[in-house]
Structure formats: C-alpha cells, structure tokens
Amino acid sequence: MGLSDAEKNRLLGELEAILDHIARLQKVDTSTLAETAQVGDLVNVMRPDEPEEPIGAAAALRNAPVTDGNYFVVGAIQGVELDA
Amino acid sequence: MTPRTITELAAALRDGSTTPRALLDDAFAHVDRTEKELNAYLTVTRELAELQADAAMRTLADHPDTASPLCGIPMALKDVLCVDGIETTAGSKMLRGFKPPYTGTAVQRLFDAGAVCIGKTNCDEFAMGSSTENSAYGPVSNPWDIERVPGGSSGGSAATVAAGSVPYSLGTDTGGSIRQPAALCGVVGFKPTYGRISRYGLIAFASSLDQIGPFTRTVEDCALVYAAIAGHDPRDSTSDPRAVDDPLAALHTGVAGMRLGIPREYLGEGTEPGVRAAVEAAFRVLEAQGATLREVSLPSTDVALSVYYIIAPAECSSNLARYDGVRFGNRVERPSLTEMYLQTRGAGFGNEVKRRVMLGTYALSSGYYDAYYRQAQKVRTLVSQEFEAVFTEVDAIVCPTSPSVAFTMGSRDDPLSMYMCDVVTLPANLAGVPGISVPCGFVDGLPVGLQVIAPRFEDARVLRVAHAYEQATDFHTVRSPYAREAA
C-alpha cells in the first residue's frame, strides 16, 4: 500500500496509541485456552462434487480496468527490478 | 398519516388502498425531498425498482393470499451488498463504478419475495467505522439532528428508515454496525446469530464476524424480514444447516417467567447518564412484564475491545488484499506491476481502511503473530465462554446498545475514542450470538437503544424479548422530524 510521508507520520502516532491500548491483552492468562478461529462448529464443509454453470469470462472481466480478449492486462511483473 | 410498517403496508396492498407503484412513488418523492440533507443513498435504483414494483403488482393480483408480506414494499440495501449490474461501492473510491456480476443470497431472497429495491445506502468505507463519516462519498446525517452522526457503519440504512423513506433496509454488523446506528437513529436493528444469514454476495470486511441483518420500525417487521433471509445457503460454507425457528411463532408470548441478566460491565463509567437512566427504566418495564432481572458479569468486556481491534483488522488486511487494480475496482496506471499495486491501493483506500490494513498486517506478521493475533484468538475463546456461563444463569441479556446518544459530526477525530463506541456491541460478534437494538427513550430529543442478546441460534428469543418491551412502551411510535414531514 503506497503511503505518503505525511500519512506515514500520522499513522505512526495513531497506531502507537492503538497498540498501547491493545497491550492490555497481554495481561490475560491464556495458558489453558484454545484459539477461536470461527464461532461455528462446522468443519470441512464441502459441496457435492458436481459441475455448475461457471460465471463466464465476459461477466468475470466486466469490471476489469484493462483487458485483452479473455485476459486481464497488467504492467511488467519485473518492472521494479528493471527500473532499479 | 405516519410512515407505516411492513405489516400495515402489506394489509393496505391487499385491501386495494395502495399499490406497489404508489408506494414506490412515495418513497422516491421522500428521498428526493430529504437526500440533500441526509446523504443516505449512494445509488438510487429507479429502473430496477419500477420493474420489481410491476412484477409485485402482478404477483399480488394473481396470488394475494400466498404472496410474501414483503411483496411490493420498498426497501434499501447497504452498499456492501451485491446486486447484479447495480453499482456497489462499499462506500469506497476503490470500487467506484463496480457493477457486480451476481446478486447476493440474502438480497436474492428478498427479491424472490417481491421486495422493491429503491437504492443502495451510504456507509463507512468497507463497513469500517461507527459514524458513517468514513464514507468516500460524504457523511450521512442523523434524521433527528442533521448536525449529528447516524452511527455506523450502516448509517445510511438506519437513517433512511428513521427518516421514513422506506419501512425497512438491510445493513451489516461486524462489531455493532447494525445495532449502534439503530440505537442512534431510534429504529430497530437486528444482528442475527453468526451463520444464520448467508454472507454470499456481501463484500467481506472481517469474515468471522460479519453478519447481515434488518433495520425496521417495529420488532414484528424485523421478524418478517429475518424470516425471509435466514437459512442455509450452500454458497456460504459458514452458513448453518440447522432449521430456522419461526421467529413469529413465539413473538407475542411475552417475558413472564424469563430470567434476564444485566452485565455490570456494560453500564460502566463511559455510559452517559441519560442513556443509563433510559435503559434502567427499560429494565423496570421488563420487570413489570413478569421477567426476573439480576446482575451478571462478563469480566472480559474490557479486553474484548482489544480482541476485536486485532481480529477485525487482521481479517480485513487479508480480505482487502483483493483490491489490487487487476480484476475489478480502480487502477492507478504505472509501468511496473508493484508500483501499480502501491499507487492503486494508496489512492483507493481512505484513512480508516489504511489504519486497519496496517494494524492487521502488523498483528499477523511473523514476529508479532503470537503476541497479538494468536493471543487475541485465545481471549476470544474466553469471551465466548463467559457468554455461555452467563446463559446458564439467565435466558437473555439486556443492556444499552451504545454508551452514548448520537454525537456531533467531527467530534471524535481520534480513532480510539471512535472504537469505544462499539464496546457493548462487539462482544456479541466475537461470540457469534444474536443481538437487537430497540428504541427505549430519548435524551434531549436524541434516541436511546436497549440491546437484547441471547445464546446462539436463539434469535427468536431475542425478538420475543424486544417485542415484549416494545409493546409495553411507545418509543417506537415517535417519529424523527423527517418522518413527520413525510406524513
């Protein structure tokens, strides 16, 4: 995420204040607690292995900023290295 | 004539005293009159609404007895809910012009019931905020006082119901984003049990916490909308397959003999005196209805805020990685791919989103994962266990929805003070339990909300308690100035 110097300076102060507040979490004894990644009790949910109608290339590409035929177009992947 | 409820409008559509087209014209006229001050809508979907109203007219003519009570009735959707071909921005510049290629499940269920969608409502960017001041398209005003916020993040959905433009709307609640704006706007707002409403077609913020739910004027209307959208959906793997209890079956059975708990931590120092007085008066009303009230304790309430502000940003930083300017959304063109990513995300996201992406990325980074994210997940278990323990002693919890009434725009520019708005709503998201806010009084003309929370999958119980309270009081019949103007 590209941030300007002014943004970086502002975020630094804000994130420090938030992290200071959040630090109270470290005081909780969690030695006997398991982690909660989700509140439900569903595990390994699978749908029937049957083919469904796909969304289709035209719909999938409809919102892309730049396309070429059935492809998304992006700049050179090695651009940063080459620029440097 | 005061703005009417779904129940009243459904009867009027069947006795011939109104038509879907007439209701639609009224709704659009009201939005046209009030939108300049309120800014509750990001898109008005006139063409879609007219098609849906005409289809509803035919359904009501052909099948008046079997048509859904929602058939032909105007409503609005928070702009994080995808509708095929209708611009859906999530309140962000990043998604300006984005037209989803499909409609989400909850929305489709309303459309199948004959609902008439008049527009997409304004919200905090990607649903991150408690005041709707974080929208890239300007803040929403509270219909009770336009200098004040409507709460957030579903501020537009709450404001349009409070203003009387539509009898109901959908919002989403990740840490209180339905219940808190409902309280601040004097309407009913319901976050069902996590897993009850499919999240398919909801633009994700924090997937283990997000839940869709309705804003209405009455609890009965809330039960009607909930009944239409709840239930298993194979397209959302966290959607629960258990059968949904009919929320209307026990709605009118009252609270006599029920045990209700008041968590002492939810009426702490931060609670405004007027809010405390209104909520304590509500406790006495419930007691007079035959409920037994007692104090209970949720000791980790204080640290729940910290848990939330690690888990929600962590999930957000992962979910929002998809906005990279490649497949959808806006792009800032640069010759190299990396530079394009950086500039696209830097230009497309607002301040609060950037803060949360940074915070979440930090909490998930290898050196800090155990100290922050893993620790937060463990304390989340503790928060859930405390709810479970309390629910062995009482049937439901009653408490304030928000520690304060609607505050003045711009008055909470420090992120932490804004995060404090959610201190009594976000624990329910961490535990996945259902919660509702119902109007319970006023402080200097500003609404106060009573929150009711029950165990997971006891959504019908939440609605039953809220309904019993509502029927014993008349706060839900008091209209905002904008709704009185509509009359």
Image (cartoon, rainbow, N blue to C red):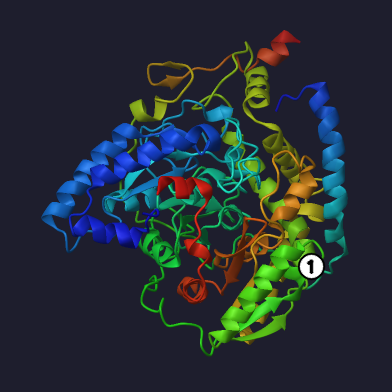
In the picture, the quarter occupied by the N terminus of chain B is bottom left
Neighbours of disc 1 within 10 Å: few (<14), some (14-19), many (20+)? few
- Furthest toward the bottom, the residue is B257
Would you say residue B385 is visible in this rendering? no
Could you tell whether A18 is left or right of B274 in the image?
Answer: right
Q: x and y percent of residue B94 in the render?
A: 57, 28
Q: Secondary structure at mark 1?
A: loop
What residue lies at 69% left-to-right and 47% top-to-bottom?
Answer: B314
Q: x and y percent of residue B152 in the render?
A: 61, 47
Residue at the disc numbered 1:
B268
What residue lies at 83% left-to-right and 39% top-to-bottom?
Answer: A14
* Near-viewer residue (B389 or B378): B389
Could you tell whether A60 is left or right of B124 in the image?
Answer: left
Q: x and y percent of residue B427 in the render?
A: 67, 64
What residue lies at 60% left-to-right and 17% top-to-bottom?
Answer: B332
Q: Report which quarter residue A31 is drawn in.
A: bottom right
Could you tell whether B140 is left or right of A29 in the image?
Answer: left
* Near-viewer residue (B244 or B442): B442
Would you say residue B76 is visible in this rendering? yes
